[in-house]
Image (cartoon, coloured by chain):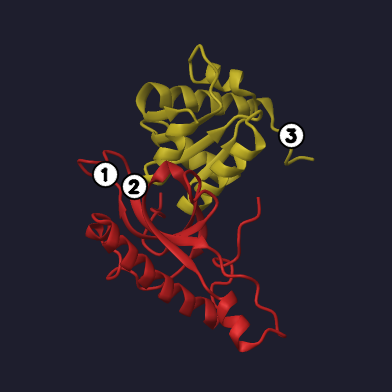
Chain colours: A red, B yellow
Amino acid sequence: MVKFLKPNKAVIVLQGRYAGRKAVIIRSFDEGTRDRPYGHCLVAGIAKYPKKVIRKDSAKKTAKKSRVKAFVKLVNYSHIMPTRYTLDVDLKDVVTLDTLQSRDKKVTAAKEVKARLEDRFKTGKNRWFFTKLRF
Amino acid sequence: MVAVKKTKKTHESINNRLALVMKSGKYTLGYKTVLRTLRSSKAKLIIISNNCPPLRKSEIEYYAMLAKVGVHHFNGNNVDLGTACGKYYRVSCLSIIDPGDSDIIKTLPGEQ
């Protein structure tokens, strides 16, 4: 009886090109819109996970291994699996509905999401979110 | 051993309560609608049959844990649960949205 598909919830995308990738809900549309008459949400996720950084890596190698590729997508609720984890990065101002209207707006939004996610990865918090889901 | 053995009397009372919900309350039957009611936080109680596939059972339990909704494992398979709902088809999982006159919400999650 508690609504759990809220912003900052970590989810796993189940269908599509990004199946198996972890994402975070930025904005949820429970009632749907005219174009999408079903419950869906705007998510930002990791397209390419950062590699495992070990202690004997040089600074250059660490920088190369900590790179993240991000994606932004509108997903149906039935195509995501919610988890008990949350990820509070502030992406509301970067990713909005109109960033998905054109290709270059989407690319710039994804680049900004990539920068923020890389910062979060380097602090070492939310380690679960940045590990690849094995299946 | 006492906890595992469900007496016949409580099993019949669950059936009676379910029949009352079917008559006077709101419910949905089936996996897809159960997940939908859990996502929209409309579900009050979930009932799963005992031969529900374990992956599906854990998935419904996980959603119910996130939504803080009680889950009851029905002492019978999907055929029995369908019969308990008064339907002529198999029901593997069902979600009670509004119990109507029944007290199934108050009595069941306490014992689960």
Residue A93's quadrant in the figure?
A: bottom left
Image position, residue A58 (x, y; %): 65, 87
Q: Is residue B39 visible?
A: yes
Q: Mark 1 near mark 2, Cβ–Cβ under 8 Å?
A: yes
State the residue position of label 3.
Answer: B5
A70 shown above or below A80: below
**The disc numbered 1 marks a residue on which chain?**
A
Identify residue type, mark 1.
Answer: Gly
Q: Earlier in the sequence, mark 1 or mark 2?
A: 1
Image position, residue A42 (x, y; %): 34, 55
Say what secondary structure mark 2 lies in: strand
Whole-Å distance between the Cαs marked 1 and 2? 6 Å
State the residue position of label 1.
Answer: A32
Name the front one of labels 2 and 3. Answer: 2
A104 shown above or below A119: above
Image position, residue A36 (x, y; %): 27, 41
* Total numbered circles: 3
